Image (cartoon, rainbow, N blue to C red):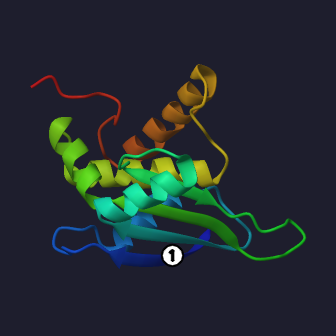
């Protein structure tokens, strides 16, 4: 069984309605393969201003985004259990769930799994890798009992 240490940082102005630490831990654990040792991940929940600033600094994009993933850059000879950091924007995730007519909890789960896979090296930079990543995301999210995240309601 894998052992995950989760450092959950909440930097949102409104705390009501956010997923619980146990939810994030369940979602991250579902996305990460089994390890023989403990792995550590930080998830920081932020408001739009902070995600805009980070998106500009690290991606040179002047707009908010739902999630940013920062894989650990510790050299392989340094034996630390760090996987990396996820920064998630509450307002964008809530807006996307509303616009896409998805359950908010399911969208939080999807974004957490999506970001966790980025920490493992998955990406969507071309059609092949995007399809591979989306297939894995869908499998994980559906194993957790949520609907396919890539089917948007037509209602």
Is any atom of residue 48 visible in this view? yes
Q: Quadrant of residue 89?
A: bottom left
Q: Is residue 92 above or below residue 38?
A: above
- Left or right: 129 as drawn, with respect to 111: right
| Percent coordinates x, y for residue 144 in the rendering | 38, 51
| Percent coordinates x, y for residue 1 in the rendering | 62, 68
Query: Tag 1: Cα neighbours inside 10 Å, few (<14), some, or many (≥20)?
Result: some
| Percent coordinates x, y for residue 129 in the rendering | 62, 29
Residue at 49%, 33% (x, y): give it: 134
Q: Is residue 7 above or below residue 154?
A: below
Local SS, label 1? strand
Q: Which residue is mark 1?
A: 6
Q: Nearer the viewer, residue 103 or 37?
A: 103
- Left or right: 63 as drawn, with respect to 154: right
Q: Quadrant of residue 82?
A: bottom right
Q: Is residue 128 above or below residue 148?
A: above
Q: Is residue 137 above or below residue 118?
A: above
Q: Nearer the viewer, residue 139 or 73?
A: 73
| Percent coordinates x, y for residue 53 in the rendering | 42, 60
Residue at 28%, 51% (x, y): give it: 93
> How many badges with numbers are in the image?
1
Q: Nearer the viewer, residue 40 or 47?
A: 47
């Amino acid at each position: 069984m894998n052992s995950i240490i989760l450092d959950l940082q909440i930097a949102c102005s409104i705390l009501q309605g956010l997923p619980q630490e146990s939810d994030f831990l369940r979602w991250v654990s579902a996305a990460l393969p089994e390890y023989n040792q403990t792995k550590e991940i930080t998830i920081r929940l932020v408001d739009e201003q902070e995600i805009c600033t980070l998106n500009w600094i690290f991606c040179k994009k002047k707009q908010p985004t739902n999630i940013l993933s920062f894989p650990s850059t510790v050299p392989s000879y340094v034996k630390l259990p760090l996987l990396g950091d996820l920064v998630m924007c509450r307002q964008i995730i809530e807006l996307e769930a509303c616009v896409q007519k998805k359950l908010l909890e399911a969208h939080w789960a999807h974004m957490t799994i999506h970001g966790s896979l980025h920490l493992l090296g998955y990406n969507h930079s071309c059609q092949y890798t995007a399809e591979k990543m989306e297939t894995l995301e869908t499998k994980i999210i559906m194993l957790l009992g949520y609907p396919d995240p890539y089917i948007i309601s037509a209602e």
